[in-house]
Structures are given as structure tokens and as C-alpha cells.
Image (cartoon, helix red, strand yellow):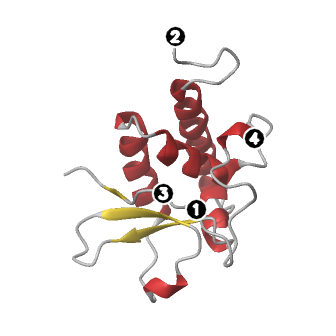
Amino acid sequence: MDVEPDRLTDEDLRRFVLDRLAEDEERLAREELPLLDEAERRGRLRILRSDDGRELLLVPGDTQSLGDREPVRFDEKARWLRREVAGTSDRSLLQLLATAYDTHHGWQEEWRTCPAPVTPTTTCRLPHRRAAR
């Protein structure tokens, strides 16, 4: 068997991210800042609109070098991420999203994509994801 006995599965990671997205939607309904938006502010990840405006892109780390782009509304990000998370087998995508919630009690350190939180001087090399059409 290829899976390490104590390693959490991709499904565990997927469920963690989907549950945190649901909690973020509740935060927004209470007019609180979603943790995903806070992670973007801190430069851990960014969800951007593609150049043609038809797709969303998830990029790791600080993306100031990509120039100013109009922020994507949380409800649009949440819908897109829910589809991406439900349909992906890319563990690195799930891990990147999970880092937005690393202060949650269910967070597992093994999910971290970098040895430390991403800052403007550290980057993680992960594939860019495009939204499914």
C-alpha cells in the first residue's frame, strides 16, 4: 500500500477545506472577515481573475508583482473553490488552501506546503490552477 499509515488522506484534507469554507461563509454573513480573505491579505495565497476575466486563478504567496487587479468577491471565490476542491486530485492545491486555515484546531502541520508561512521573501512552487469551464 502506498499510503503512510498515519498520513491523513486527501479526502480528510478536502473535507477540512470545505468545512472551513462553510465557516467563512458564516463569518461573512455575520459581517466578519473570512479567514480566506485574511490569508490573502497576509500574502499566503491569492485568487485572481484571469487576464480575460473569464476564469479564476489560485496562486501561492504574495502576488504584488502581478499588478493591481480587482478583488474577487468572496461569494464568487467560495463557489469556484468549492467546485475546484470537490473535483481535484491535486493534493498541493488542497494543501495550499488549507494553509489559509492553519490557526484552526483541526489543522495538521503535515499539510503545510512550505516549511514556514509564505512571506514576500519565501515562495512555494505549486502549479497554477485554472477554473473548469
Q: Residue at x 42, y 83 (%)?
A: 69
Q: Which mark is residue 124?
A: 1
Amino acid type of disc 2?
Met
Amino acid type of disc 1?
Cys
The crowd level at tag 2 (other Cα within 10 Å; few <14, some 14-19, many 20+) is: few
Mark 3 lies on a secondary structure that is: loop
Mark 1 lies on a secondary structure that is: loop
Per the model, the C-alpha gap separating discs 4 and 3 is: 18 Å
Q: Residue at x 52, y 25 (%)?
A: 11
Per the model, the C-alpha gap separating discs 3 and 1 is: 6 Å
Q: Nearer the viewer, mark 3 or mark 2?
A: 2
Q: Residue at x 76, y 43 (%)?
A: 104
Amino acid type of disc 4?
Glu
Q: Nearer the viewer, residue 128 or 1?
A: 1
Q: Which mark is residue 1?
A: 2
> Which image quadrant for residue 73?
bottom left
- Residue 105, given in percent of the width and then of the height, sits at 80, 37
Amino acid type of disc 3?
Leu
Labels 3 and 1 touching (C-beta < 8 A): yes
Q: Which mark is residue 40?
A: none
Labels 3 and 2 touching (C-beta < 8 A): no
Hey, which residue is sitting farthest front in the picture? 2
* Residue labelled with disc 4: 109
Q: Nearer the viewer, mark 1 or mark 2?
A: 2
Per the model, the C-alpha gap separating discs 1 and 2 is: 29 Å
* Residue labelled with disc 3: 126
Q: Residue at x 65, y 73 (%)?
A: 41
Q: Is residue 68 above or below residue 122?
A: below
- Residue 89, given in percent of the width and then of the height, sits at 39, 34
